[in-house]
Image: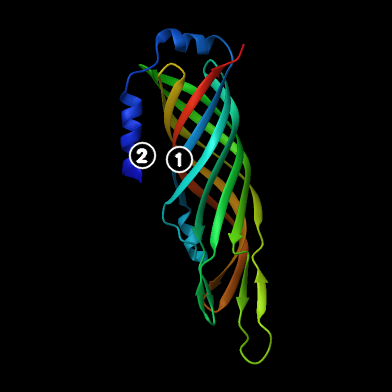
Amino acid sequence: MWGVLARLALVALLGPGAAPAAAAERDAGWSCSLGLLAGSALPDARLGDFQWDVAPRAAWGGQVLLERGRFATGARLWRSSTTQTMDLPSGPVAPRVGLTRLELTGQGRVLALGSTALLVTAAAGWLHLGYAPDHITIPPSGSGAPIVVSLRAVDEWIGGAGVALRRPWGGRWSTSLGVDREFFGLDAAHRSGSAIVYGRESLGEWSARLEVARQFQLR
């Protein structure tokens, strides 16, 4: 996946840029950008202590920005998923964990290399962790009834920063490739020898995104 994203990004970033007149028109006033996002998310390696699968995962989302000159602000949706293995007397189960991020985001252009712009980005918002299925059934050891354990959804604040390269093409379209690191906290418990350790963990996630966006001039 990383190789495919890199090839797509190189084609987009090294291809023909937008006409100077179109770029000047966008910088002259407000514009709106609607983008589709695809890429990969890499969970914090420490989540492996809680039996999460921490391999890179496909991710997708969307973004809407209001832009003027060097700066832009808006909202972003970003979704990925992984699994968490739980060892039961009847054998391990691995429910899917969906991670949905809804954030306010901002970006600023710090350098222009021809038609390609280097951006710094920042975001802050809400992270939702949900399980599917959202319960597990533990079979009884004797003749009693099975125990059903609910896997409660978790909501946390999240925020971070990153960098991106963006290049316009076709007049009103643009392609960007960005990488960021975001941080969040979780109340967690894991086994350490024969003891169960409870605590608040500060965790993070790397994301790499390829965006294809359409700009609309606002009059």
> Mark 1: which amino acid?
Ala
Instruction: Name the residue: 53% across, 82% down.
Output: 90
Q: On residue 5, which mark appears?
A: 2
Q: Is residue 102 above or below residue 64?
A: below
Q: On residue 72, which mark appears?
A: none
Kindly give the residue lying farthest to the bottom in the view shown: 143
Dot 2 or dot 1, earlier in sequence:
2
**Which image quarter is the C terminus in?**
top right
Q: CA distance from mark 2 to mark 1?
A: 9 Å
Spot occupied by residue 78 in the image (x, y as percentages of width and height): 54, 42
Q: Residues within 10 Å of mark 1 (few under 14, many from 20)?
A: some
Instruction: Name the residue: 67% across, 75% down.
Output: 148
Q: Is residue 167 above or below residue 90?
A: above
Q: For the residues labelled 2 and 1, say whether their Cβ atoms are less than 8 Å apart.
A: yes
Which residue is at the front of the view, 135 or 118? 135
Q: Residues within 10 Å of mark 2 (few under 14, many from 20)?
A: some
Spot occupied by residue 175 in the image (x, y as percentages of width and height): 42, 28
Instruction: Name the residue: 57% across, 11% down.
Output: 29
Spot occupied by residue 5 in the image (x, y as percentages of width and height): 36, 39
> Mark 2: which amino acid?
Leu
Q: On residue 38, which mark appears?
A: 1
Which residue is at the front of the view, 173 or 190? 173
Q: Secondary structure at mark 1?
A: strand
Q: Is residue 185 above or below residue 92?
A: above
Q: Secondary structure at mark 2?
A: helix
